[in-house]
Amino acid sequence: MRGLFRKFKDGLKRQTPTFRKAFEGIFSGAKLDQDALEELEEALYTADFGHQTVEEIIKEIQAAYKADKSMRGEDAAKIGATVLTRVLEGAEGRVEIGNNNPEVISLIGVNGAGKTTTSAKLSYLYQNEGYKVLLGACDTFRAAANEQIKAWADRLDIDIVSSQHGADSAAVAFDALAAAKSRKRDLVILDTAGRLHTKSNLMKELEKMLRVIHKQDETAPHHSWLVVDGSLGSNSIEQARAFHKSFPLTGLIITKLDGTSRGGALVGIYRELKLPIYFVGLGEQPDDLQPFSAKNYANAIFGISEDH
């Protein structure tokens, strides 16, 4: 748990100083400083936490200060982390591998969200947990996708089924699931082509892939996760809403949280769609994909140490 918290803290370091500065300013005077409180409120809005969450945090800090004028900035930070953890109650997604044979996870999303690298990192994570994993390279649309995912598979020693550029992605998915069954794999992770949620023809291709997978296993895919670029901020909420409307999503992976000051958007996505967040991307290395922890996320955002 200690290493996991440090991943969150290091990955979210661009956001933490902003809040720490605001919290220190709140209690710099003898009584609550409205300017400093507004600075904190602005920092929360800038990070795209959304109106409802921001108002809840500010309201509770104000109430606590009125009850105890000796409060310090670190006390306010703890309140912020507590409120955020409460808002994210139920947000932690967990997969029980072994309920299906094999378990199938399909990753979808727009171009540039990080699906390909995420699929490789996810395979690596489960493989390190002792599961037999097969990676299906179903992004046959993007020319560099095959080379990219094969390089990751070679680097991390992951079993992979792929095809040439321009091949039928549904056929690759079918072959991947068939291979997983014959090789007795526990888990299949399908990396699909990036598609704009506004393009109906691309969404239909995804629907075709699902129909083909059903021929192998009518219950698959057992998990359909939207990979969302966390640096998009509030724009990612509209993206998630549109995908969820046209496609039965079961969860989320939020990437690129290490390089953004707008990582609060994941709170808005969860509040609106109530889709569990399974993993977050906090860096470029294979082990920088981490299971989502609401407490670790909230504490790291507000600069709370792991000892509290």
Image: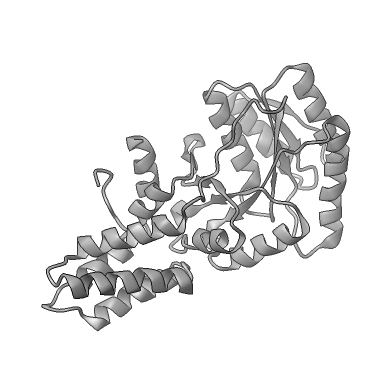
Residue 258, position as x, y percentages in the image: 44, 52
Residue 223, position as x, y percentages in the image: 68, 41
Q: How many callouts does the rendering have? A: 0
Task: Determine the residue positioned at 62% across, 48% down.
Answer: 251
Q: Is residue 21 above or below residue 42?
A: above
Q: Is residue 166 visible?
A: no
Q: Is residue 256 above or below residue 218?
A: below
**On the rendered structure, is 147 left or right of 306?**
right
Residue 81 is drawn in which quadrant? bottom left
Of the 4 image quadrants, the one containing the N terminus is top left
Residue 118, position as x, y percentages in the image: 60, 42
| View extreme (bottom): residue | 34
**Of residues 201 and 274, the one drawn nearer to the viewer in this rendering:** 274
**On the rendered structure, is 4 left or right of 71?**
right
**On the rendered structure, is 300 left or right of 137?**
left
Q: How is the image coloured?
A: one colour
Task: Determine the residue positioned at 31% across, 69% down.
Answer: 60
